Image: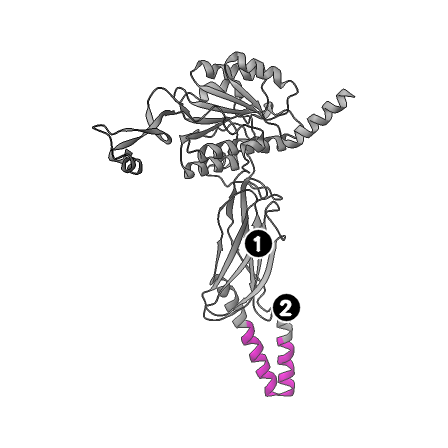
């Protein structure tokens, strides 16, 4: 500003001394351009509409295209507009987005980039800083901001066989001699038509071949609901690589939920972990500056997330996966006193898949309380256990089944240490 004023005064002095009209025209032109730039530049930026378009949910490993749509709602062009988009490191594929564009009057332009879901979580996309100015740099730079949006990355889902679990675990829909209802997925031959049979049950092809009405018979079954009881109490995770163990436990929980849902079984989720989004409540959630991931609050005085009751359907599975995407380890409620009361709302006979780091005596006693309460618990431990045969025998004596599902690298380390021990 001071340099511009000095230039105008210098030109005025020359114009008055030399009495040259052309110099006065130059002064008028410069002053006019300066005044126009000072008036138009900030107003032009306010006329720019910016929208971030993307899918706000993604599966693990999926690439998500993001489109920044810029619209100049003014009739006049914008000389330049610089965009600086903040992208989480865990999501970025080509670093941060920094680009300069020009916009004609009433023009719409799209800028695209891509993020990759490398780790489950609740991430922040943005904010984006917009900087604009005039062509000659006389009015200075003006800035505005596009608020951040959010992306939920679901946990990785693995087949049960790859987890080390049999594809047919003792949960879900079980064959029963007690005829609760006839399961259409369990055909069991045909019989003669009787008064009162539904026309929908008639097997028309077989009836036409045998020249008499025959109806399909179905194997009776009963449907038992399943709920996943997920222990995320920090004091139970004693290993040095606690973070990777928790991620593995979440993967196991998500895989079991997806398997049950794909089998059209009812599945629910109960956990004593921390949901940072729920604890934040009306307050602004905090995100890690490096990873861009939602941070769990420091305080541990919050309540455990509400249980997700067993239901069927794809939308219900997505609700469970959303919870598992955000959930973090915490010290809200210890597992042993919490397990029985947490399952109090479940119906008698419900299968409870308990995911916890280890199966020591106190954990087995807590699971035994669920057996006595009329449930069908299945204990799934996710830390490697050299004495798991002892845990399995203890579980058998207490009336429930147990499985040990350590990570693949844990199995390799386990095997290596066993070989070294035999040398």
Which numbered circle lies on residue 2? 2
Q: Is residue 277 magenta?
A: no
Are circles 1 and 2 on residues that touch, CB within 8 Å? no
From the viewer's perspective, is 207 left or right of 244?
left
The percent coordinates of residue 206 (x first, y second) are 31, 35
The percent coordinates of residue 299 (x first, y second) are 55, 30
Q: Nearer the viewer, residue 413 or 150?
A: 413
Which numbered circle lies on residue 146? none
Q: Which residue is mark 1?
A: 85
Tell me which segment is drawn in magenta.
Answer: 8-34
Question: Residue 196 is drawn in which quadrant?
Answer: top left
Q: Is residue 28 magenta?
A: yes
State whether residue 63 is above or below residue 233: below
Question: Residue 113 is drawn in which quadrant?
Answer: bottom right
Circle nearer the N terminus (1, 2)? 2
State whether residue 205 is above or below residue 65: above
Q: CA distance from mark 1 to mark 2?
A: 33 Å
Q: Residues within 10 Å of mark 1 (few under 14, many from 20)?
A: many
Q: Is residue 328 visible?
A: no
């Amino acid at each position: 500003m001071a340099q511009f004023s000095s230039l105008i005064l210098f030109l005025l002095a020359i114009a008055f001394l030399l009495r040259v009209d052309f110099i006065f025209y130059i002064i008028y032109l410069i002053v006019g351009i300066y005044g126009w730039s000072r008036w138009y530049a900030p107003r032009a930026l306010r006329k720019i509409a910016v929208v971030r378009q993307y899918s706000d949910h993604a599966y693990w490993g999926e690439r998500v295209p993001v489109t920044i749509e810029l619209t100049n709602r003014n009739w006049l062009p914008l000389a330049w507009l610089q965009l600086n988009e903040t992208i989480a490191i865990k999501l970025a594929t080509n670093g941060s987005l920094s680009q300069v564009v020009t916009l004609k009057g009433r023009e719409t332009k799209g800028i695209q980039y891509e993020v990759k879901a490398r780790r489950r979580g609740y991430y922040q996309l943005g904010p984006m800083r917009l900087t604009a100015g005039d062509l000659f740099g006389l009015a200075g730079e003006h800035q505005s901001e596009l608020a951040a949006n959010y992306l939920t990355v679901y946990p990785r889902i693995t087949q049960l066989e790859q987890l080390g679990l049999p594809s047919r675990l003792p949960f879900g829909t079980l064959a029963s001699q007690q005829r609760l209802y006839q399961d259409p997925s369990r055909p069991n031959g045909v019989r003669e038509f009787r008064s009162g049979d539904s026309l929908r049950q008639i097997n028309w092809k077989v009836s036409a071949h045998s020249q008499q009405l025959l109806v399909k018979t179905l194997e009776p079954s009963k449907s038992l609901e399943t709920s996943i009881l997920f222990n995320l109490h920090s004091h139970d995770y004693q290993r040095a690589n606690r973070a990777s163990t928790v991620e593995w436990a979440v993967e196991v929980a998500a895989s079991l939920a997806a398997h049950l849902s794909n089998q059209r079984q009812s599945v629910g989720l109960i956990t004593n972990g921390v949901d940072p989004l729920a604890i934040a409540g009306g307050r602004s959630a905090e995100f890690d500056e490096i990873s861009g991931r939602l941070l769990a609050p420091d305080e541990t005085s919050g309540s455990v997330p509400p249980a997700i009751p067993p239901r069927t359907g794809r939308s219900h599975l997505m609700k469970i996966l959303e919870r598992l995407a955000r959930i973090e380890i915490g010290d809200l409620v210890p597992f042993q006193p919490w397990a029985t009361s947490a399952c109090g709302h479940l119906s008698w006979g419900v299968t409870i898949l308990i995911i916890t780091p280890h199966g020591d005596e106190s954990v087995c006693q807590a699971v035994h309380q669920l057996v006595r309460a009329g449930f069908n618990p299945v204990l799934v431990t996710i830390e490697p256990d050299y004495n798991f045969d002892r845990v399995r025998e203890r579980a058998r004596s207490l009336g429930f089944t147990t499985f040990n599902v350590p990570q693949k690298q844990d199995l390799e380390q386990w095997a290596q240490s066993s070989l070294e021990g035999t040398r």
